[in-house]
Image (cartoon, rainbow, N blue to C red):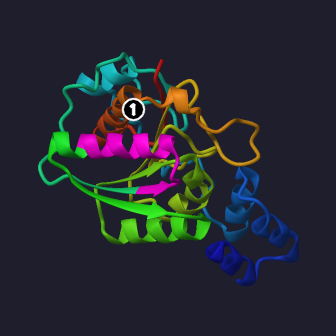
Amino acid sequence: MRRLAAVAEAGLPNRFKASVLGPLTAAAVALTLAACGATAPGTAPHDGASPAPLTGFAARFVGSSHQPAPEATVRPTPGTWDDVAAPAGFSMVVVARGADATTATLTDAVEHYAEEHGADLTVLPARDDDEVEQRIDEAVAAAPDLVVGVGDGVVDVFSLITAQYLETDFLLVGAQLPEPTHNVTAVVWPGAEFRGTGLGNDAARANAVTPDRAREAVAAGAASVLHDLTGIVIELG
């Protein structure tokens, strides 16, 4: 990828360059960030204050009055997100890679959510890693309220690039990052839990990504982000 190569040419010590230029694994990303003095993935800014206890929808959704830890897996009660409406003027951008039926179903689910909630939606298709990176940059430049990634093909690039845009909320549907930062939320379910290339898990199964389950996942993920429950994995039963 262009940006990864640029990082390697920016003067990293030789012992780090092999990791930077290799596959986009969680270990490589963590090593690169550490070498640059950046915050490691999976850690959120901490100002020393204890988080406020969750109340209302947030507590019902998480099933606890306590803020979930970064990267925690939350199994909310089905339907707790049904009455959560996106605010007026809510804007979304979808980055979708792949022409397969699974990616199409997930994209359709985001379009359904946007139509149902009156949200502004832009869909940015991508054909390869470089285009996924470009589409993320374009999405962030548009300053939407939420950037959604669909298709297993976006996961490796999201693992690297989303940590560079910590002020932007990202949502992955039907997949997750190996080590998400506090601004990346994911919704997974059995058969749709891809974590990235080389991590020993399979791509999403087409029979697991039904229109109903995809719409449910988008609604649950958006509800979580709207209530600042980010950086977690939402697992649907």
x and y percentages locating residue 23 in the rendered image: 76, 59
Kindly indicate the quadrant of the structure image that contains residue 83. Answer: top left
Amino acid at circle 1: Ala
How far from the left and from the top, in percent, is residue 195?
64, 41
Q: Residue at x 50, y 40 (%)?
A: 102
Indicate the position of residue 79 as horizontal and vertical percent values. 29, 19
| In the image: residue 178, left or right of residue 23 | left
Residue 158 x, y percent position in the rendering: 55, 56
Q: Determine if the magenta segment contains residue 100.
A: yes
Residue 94, quarter of the rendered image: bottom left
At x 53%, y 69%, the residue is 131
For the N terminus, the quadrant is: bottom right
Instruction: State the extent of the magenta-drawn residues as a range.
Output: 95-113
Majority secondary structure of magenta residues? helix
As drawn, is 193 to the left or to the right of 95? right
Mark 1 surroundings within 10 Å by alpha-carbon count, few (fewer than 14), some (14 through 19), many (20 or more): many
